[in-house]
Amino acid sequence: MSIEAGTKFQISQTIKSNFNSSEALTVVNNNGITVQFILDDGKGRGSMPLDHLKYLLKRANLTQVKNNKRILINDENNEEKIG
């Protein structure tokens, strides 16, 4: 899975206290080593090593939120390439 700017992750109940009790975080920048993010509801911002983000995903402490708008745009692009 590629972690791009704009990718949103839901934060599990077990680690919310580490993220100012925020429900979700959104990736702002990924330089391949460090990931910068903002927390929902203006609760702050931060950064972490990319490896640690992958570890949190593996342990299911973070789950990717599917962005309906991004999915729709991808579907439209695929249709244009096919048609």
Image (cartoon, rainbow, N blue to C red):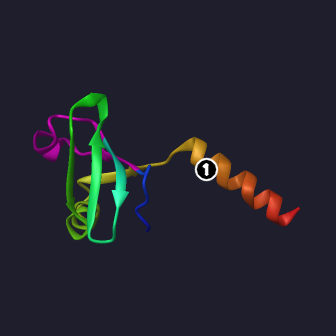
The residue carrying mark 1 is 71
Spot occupied by residue 15 in the image (x, y as percentages of width and height) = 14, 47
Spot occupied by residue 72 in the image (x, y as percentages of width and height) = 66, 46
Q: Residues within 10 Å of mark 1 (few under 14, many from 20)?
A: few
- Residue furthest right as drawn: 83
Q: Which residue lies at the image location 27% right of the left edge and 29% below the top edge?
A: 42
> Which of 78 and 6 lies nearest the eye of the viewer?
6
Q: Which residue lies at the image location 40% right of the left edge and 62% below the top edge?
A: 3
Residue span colored magenta: 8-24
Q: The N terminus is located in which quarter?
A: bottom left
Left or right position of 27 against 69: left
Left or right position of 49 against 4: left
Spot occupied by residue 73 in the image (x, y as percentages of width and height) = 66, 49
Is 59 situated above or below 28?
below
- Residue furthest left as drawn: 17
Q: Which residue lies at the image location 80% right of the left edge and 58% below the top edge?
A: 79
Asked which quadrant contains residue 75, the reply is: bottom right
Dot 1: element: helix
> Which of 26 and 61 lies nearest the eye of the viewer?
26
Is 43 situated above or below 6?
above
Spot occupied by residue 38 in the image (x, y as percentages of width and height) = 29, 42
Asked which quadrant contains residue 25, the reply is: top left
Is 3 situated above or below 44?
below
Q: Is residue 54 magenta?
A: no
Q: Which residue lies at the image location 21% right of the left edge and 54% below the top edge?
A: 47
> Which of 49 and 71 lies nearest the eye of the viewer?
49
Q: Amino acid at mark 1?
A: Ile
